[in-house]
Image (spheres, helix red, strand yellow):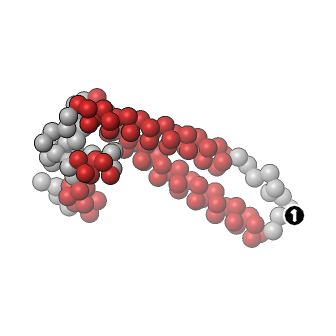
Amino acid sequence: MALKKAQIQQFKIRLEELRAQLTHTLVGTTEQVKIPDESTGYSQHQADQGTDDFDRRINLELTSKEYELLRQIERALEKIEGDTYGVCDITGNEIPVARLEAVPYATMTVEAQEKFEKGLPVE
Protein backbone atom coordinates (compact mmCIF):
# COMPACT_ATOMS: atom_id res chain seq x y z
CA MET A 1 0.00 0.00 0.00
CA ALA A 2 1.54 3.29 -1.11
CA LEU A 3 1.97 6.09 1.40
CA LYS A 4 -0.67 8.79 1.49
CA LYS A 5 0.30 12.44 0.97
CA ALA A 6 -0.55 13.24 4.61
CA GLN A 7 1.77 10.45 5.81
CA ILE A 8 4.58 11.67 3.57
CA GLN A 9 4.10 15.21 4.87
CA GLN A 10 4.39 13.96 8.46
CA PHE A 11 7.59 12.09 7.60
CA LYS A 12 8.95 15.20 5.88
CA ILE A 13 8.31 17.32 8.99
CA ARG A 14 9.98 14.69 11.16
CA LEU A 15 12.99 14.44 8.85
CA GLU A 16 13.38 18.22 8.76
CA GLU A 17 13.29 18.30 12.58
CA LEU A 18 15.91 15.54 12.76
CA ARG A 19 18.07 17.44 10.27
CA ALA A 20 17.83 20.64 12.31
CA GLN A 21 18.73 18.85 15.56
CA LEU A 22 21.63 17.03 13.97
CA THR A 23 22.95 20.16 12.29
CA HIS A 24 22.87 21.99 15.62
CA THR A 25 24.72 19.11 17.30
CA LEU A 26 27.29 18.93 14.51
CA VAL A 27 28.07 22.62 14.77
CA GLY A 28 28.81 22.25 18.49
CA THR A 29 30.85 19.07 18.10
CA THR A 30 32.84 20.43 15.18
CA GLU A 31 33.67 23.60 17.11
CA GLN A 32 34.71 21.52 20.12
CA VAL A 33 37.13 19.47 18.00
CA LYS A 34 38.63 22.61 16.41
CA ILE A 35 39.33 24.42 19.71
CA PRO A 36 42.98 24.05 20.60
CA ASP A 37 43.64 22.79 24.10
CA GLU A 38 44.58 25.89 26.10
CA SER A 39 46.14 23.88 28.89
CA THR A 40 48.63 22.07 26.67
CA GLY A 41 52.12 22.91 27.78
CA TYR A 42 55.17 21.62 29.54
CA SER A 43 53.47 21.30 32.92
CA GLN A 44 50.63 19.06 31.68
CA HIS A 45 50.90 15.43 32.69
CA GLN A 46 51.32 12.91 29.90
CA ALA A 47 48.22 10.96 31.00
CA ASP A 48 46.12 14.14 30.77
CA GLN A 49 47.31 14.70 27.23
CA GLY A 50 46.42 11.10 26.36
CA THR A 51 42.93 11.60 27.76
CA ASP A 52 42.51 14.80 25.76
CA ASP A 53 43.65 13.04 22.58
CA PHE A 54 41.24 10.18 23.26
CA ASP A 55 38.35 12.63 23.80
CA ARG A 56 39.20 14.44 20.58
CA ARG A 57 39.31 11.14 18.66
CA ILE A 58 35.91 10.12 20.07
CA ASN A 59 34.45 13.50 19.05
CA LEU A 60 35.83 13.08 15.53
CA GLU A 61 34.33 9.58 15.27
CA LEU A 62 30.95 10.82 16.49
CA THR A 63 31.08 13.71 14.06
CA SER A 64 31.76 11.29 11.21
CA LYS A 65 28.78 9.12 12.18
CA GLU A 66 26.55 12.18 12.53
CA TYR A 67 27.54 13.40 9.06
CA GLU A 68 26.62 9.97 7.65
CA LEU A 69 23.23 10.15 9.38
CA LEU A 70 22.73 13.66 8.01
CA ARG A 71 23.50 12.35 4.51
CA GLN A 72 20.84 9.65 4.96
CA ILE A 73 18.30 12.23 6.12
CA GLU A 74 19.09 14.40 3.09
CA ARG A 75 18.64 11.37 0.80
CA ALA A 76 15.22 10.64 2.32
CA LEU A 77 14.18 14.28 1.81
CA GLU A 78 15.36 14.03 -1.82
CA LYS A 79 13.18 10.94 -2.23
CA ILE A 80 10.19 12.88 -0.89
CA GLU A 81 10.79 15.63 -3.45
CA GLY A 82 11.17 12.99 -6.18
CA ASP A 83 7.98 11.16 -5.18
CA THR A 84 9.90 7.97 -4.40
CA TYR A 85 9.84 8.11 -0.60
CA GLY A 86 8.89 4.74 0.86
CA VAL A 87 10.32 2.82 -2.09
CA CYS A 88 13.49 0.76 -1.63
CA ASP A 89 16.47 2.20 -3.54
CA ILE A 90 17.72 -1.30 -4.31
CA THR A 91 14.72 -3.53 -4.97
CA GLY A 92 11.98 -1.03 -5.83
CA ASN A 93 9.71 -2.68 -3.25
CA GLU A 94 7.70 -0.63 -0.78
CA ILE A 95 9.33 -0.02 2.58
CA PRO A 96 6.88 -0.98 5.35
CA VAL A 97 5.37 1.98 7.22
CA ALA A 98 6.49 0.46 10.54
CA ARG A 99 10.12 0.65 9.35
CA LEU A 100 9.69 4.26 8.23
CA GLU A 101 8.15 5.15 11.58
CA ALA A 102 11.14 3.62 13.36
CA VAL A 103 13.74 4.93 10.89
CA PRO A 104 12.22 7.75 8.83
CA TYR A 105 15.42 8.12 6.79
CA ALA A 106 15.36 4.45 5.67
CA THR A 107 15.85 4.13 1.93
CA MET A 108 15.91 0.33 1.80
CA THR A 109 13.81 -2.51 3.12
CA VAL A 110 15.29 -4.43 6.05
CA GLU A 111 16.10 -7.39 3.80
CA ALA A 112 17.86 -5.24 1.19
CA GLN A 113 19.74 -3.33 3.90
CA GLU A 114 21.01 -6.56 5.49
CA LYS A 115 22.19 -7.96 2.15
CA PHE A 116 23.76 -4.63 1.19
CA GLU A 117 25.68 -4.42 4.49
CA LYS A 118 26.92 -8.01 4.09
CA GLY A 119 28.02 -7.30 0.51
CA LEU A 120 25.62 -9.88 -0.88
CA PRO A 121 23.82 -9.40 -4.20
CA VAL A 122 20.41 -7.79 -3.71
CA GLU A 123 17.64 -8.91 -6.04
Which quarter of the image is occupied by the N terminus?
Answer: top left
Query: What residue appears at the point 30 percent right and 48 percent down from the top-left corner?
Result: 101
Q: Which residue is mark 1?
A: 43
| Residue neighbourhood size for the residue with mark 1, other residues' Cα within 10 Å, grouped as few (<14), some (14–19), many (≥20) | few
Query: Foreground residue, 97 or 72?
Result: 97
Q: In the rendering, at what x and y percent does residue 85 appear? A: 24, 37
Outermost residue toward the front in this view = 6
Q: How many marks?
A: 1
Q: Amino acid at mark 1?
A: Ser
Query: What residue appears at the point 81 percent right and 68 percent down from the top-left corner?
Result: 45
Query: Foreground residue, 56 or 29?
Result: 29
In the image, is residue 5 above or below residue 43?
above
Q: Is residue 77 visible?
A: no
- Lateral position of residue 76 relative to residue 67, left or right: left
Which quarter of the image is occupied by the C terminus?
Answer: bottom left
In the image, is residue 10 above or below residue 61?
above
Q: In the rendering, at what x and y percent does residue 28 appear? A: 61, 44
Q: In the rendering, at what x and y percent does residue 54 appear? A: 64, 63
- Lateral position of residue 46 relative to residue 27, left or right: right
Q: In the rendering, at what x and y percent does residue 36 appear? A: 73, 49
Query: What residue appears at the point 56 percent right and 44 percent down from the top-left corner?
Result: 25
Query: What residue appears at the point 14 percent right and 46 percent down from the top-left corner?
Result: 93
Query: What secondary structure is marked by label 1?
Result: loop
Q: Is residue 117 visible?
A: yes
